[in-house]
């Protein structure tokens, strides 16, 4: 197979997003737009990836360096159009011999099967392969004007299109594929003889035709190439992503009575036989095994839920939550960085942060793992079969041994031995008749007003 590289254009200002966050760092399915595009070009077989960034977005450069290395960064400075942006990647691709795929960094729904046809067109002998689409509204897009044999003759912008050309449905998606040396040869011949004084990538179509080279186009679904330039478009992309994920999980055997109310992330893993109830939100890093039930209005992030476990309703699993088989995490229970053993239960109004809960332990309503002193975090460990009474505060670092009990309302500050009962309460004091005297005094005072 011919070696493959990719140039991802991510130097745009993104002003229409109206956000301090660079456009390509906004997220769909819990993953940045740029990460999603990098994922796609990696999966389509691109061994070399160069991301073109602008000087105005150091955070974009930071993401690229962290994920791909410094050699994957090309800087467009100043920004002089899309053709100029791709040309900025020339040095980074020096020595590469093969096909170069040029894609936009803000297309979160692009998939490998949308790009494969471009490489196929190259294999069939087309020096230049373009990605097109047929939008519901063609008003803003350049038309792909093709001959009877499918050869692309030119790209016509909407304002310059004749009435017949305006009837053409196929539009250019801003992405293409060509051999590296040929691509950069065309780019170096581009001119900026236009109103904006910019070098447009579309200009290479005319240059290829002038060189009497074949230009072909592959048509992808509109959703595949849609950009996320505005908050509205970002929300539309998220909606399409969620529809795809719901359909995927239903097809895989995950039960959802109201799938339109469930939200998933790019890396969500759910086994067949699991149940997802209404209004569940699953953020990145979640794995749910077969037979587990996630009840309504629960939020999960960075968590594992083992087979047969019951979560919620109204539960929150934070990063590091590891819920064992047949364990119960009930309503208004929050778990963070705690391994909960098989069959353990925390059914009501509880915070479990940093530590472990042993198999078949019972955590009473209102229990708090007091894990933070304002500076550092400490662990709490509850042994197998232990029983934590309601309204207990376990002040970490502390260990409650296997089979031990803590009395309701206790503040446990020292380790509890296995099978022991720990009580930490002040002596109850009763003042006879106090309540009656208090009410009488209050009523008398009120009557004088």
Image: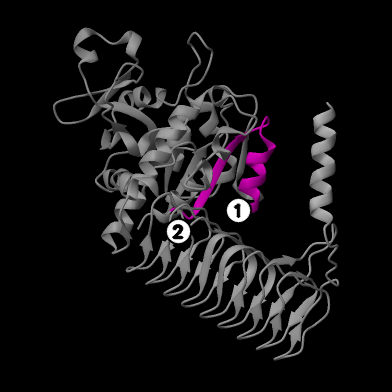
Does 191 lie within the magenta span?
no
Query: Badge 2: few (under 14), some or many (20 or more) residues near its Cα, within 10 Å?
Result: some
Whether residue 337 sits left or right of residue 215 in the image: it is right
Q: Which residues are magenta?
A: 46-68
Which label sits on residue 268?
A: 2
Q: Position of residue 197 (x, y in %)?
A: 54, 13
Q: Position of residue 126 (x, y in %)?
A: 28, 39
The answer to which of 239 and 141 lies nearer the viewer is: 239
Q: Nearer the viewer, mark 2 or mark 1?
A: 2
Query: In the rendered view, would you say 208 is above or below 110?
Result: above
Which label sits on residue 342?
A: none
The answer to which of 169 and 449 lies nearer the viewer is: 449
The answer to which of 396 and 41 lies nearer the viewer is: 396
Q: Quadrant of the N terminus?
A: bottom left
**Is residue 110 something one can see in this rendering?**
no
Query: In the rendered view, would you say 272 is above or below 160?
Result: below
Which label sits on residue 67?
A: 1
Place residue 318 in its image quadrant.
Answer: bottom right
């Amino acid at each position: 197979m011919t070696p493959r590289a990719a140039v991802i254009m991510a130097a745009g200002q993104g002003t229409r997003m109206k956000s301090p966050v660079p456009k390509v760092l906004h997220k769909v399915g819990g993953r940045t737009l740029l990460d999603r595009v990098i994922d796609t070009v990696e999966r389509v077989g691109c061994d070399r990836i160069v991301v073109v960034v602008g000087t105005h977005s150091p955070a974009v450069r930071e993401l690229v360096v962290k994920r791909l290395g410094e050699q994957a960064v090309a800087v467009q400075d100043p920004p002089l159009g899309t053709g100029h942006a791709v040309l900025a990647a020339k040095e980074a691709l020096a020595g590469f011999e093969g096909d170069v795929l040029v894609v936009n960094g803000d297309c979160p729904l692009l998939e490998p099967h949308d790009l494969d046809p471009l490489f196929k067109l190259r294999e069939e002998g087309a020096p230049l392969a373009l990605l097109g689409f047929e939008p519901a509204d063609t008003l803003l897009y350049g038309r792909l004007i093709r001959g009877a044999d499918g050869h692309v003759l030119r790209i016509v912008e909407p304002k310059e299109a004749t009435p017949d050309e305006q009837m053409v449905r196929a539009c250019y998606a801003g992405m293409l594929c060509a051999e590296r040396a040929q691509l950069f040869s065309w780019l170096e011949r581009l001119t900026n003889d236009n109103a904006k004084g910019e070098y447009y990538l579309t200009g290479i179509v005319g240059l290829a035709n002038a060189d009497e080279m074949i230009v072909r186009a592959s048509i992808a679904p509109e959703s595949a190439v849609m950009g996320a330039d505005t908050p509205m478009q970002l929300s539309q992309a998220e909606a399409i992503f969620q529809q795809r994920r719901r359909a995927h999980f239903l097809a895989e055997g995950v039960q959802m009575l109201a799938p339109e109310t469930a939200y998933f992330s790019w890396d969500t893993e759910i086994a067949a036989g699991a149940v997802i109830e209404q209004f569940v939100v699953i953020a990145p890093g979640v794995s749910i095994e077969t037979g587990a039930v996630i009840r309504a209005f629960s939020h999960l992030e960075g968590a594992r839920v083992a087979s047969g476990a019951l979560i919620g309703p109204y539960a929150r699993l934070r990063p590091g939550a590891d819920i064992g088989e047949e364990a119960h995490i009930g309503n208004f229970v929050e778990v963070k960085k705690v391994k909960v053993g098989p069959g353990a239960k925390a059914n009501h109004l509880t915070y479990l942060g940093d530590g472990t809960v042993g198999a078949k332990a019972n955590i009473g309503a209102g229990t708090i793992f007091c894990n933070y002193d304002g500076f550092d975090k400490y662990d709490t460990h509850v042994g197998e079969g232990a029983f934590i009474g309601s309204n207990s505060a376990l002040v970490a670092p502390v260990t409650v041994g296997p089979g031990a009990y803590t009395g309701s309302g206790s503040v446990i500050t020292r380790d509890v031995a296995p099978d022991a009962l720990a009580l930490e309460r002040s002596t109850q004091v009763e003042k006879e008749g106090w309540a009656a005297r208090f009410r009488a005094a209050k009523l008398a005072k009120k009557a004088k007003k």
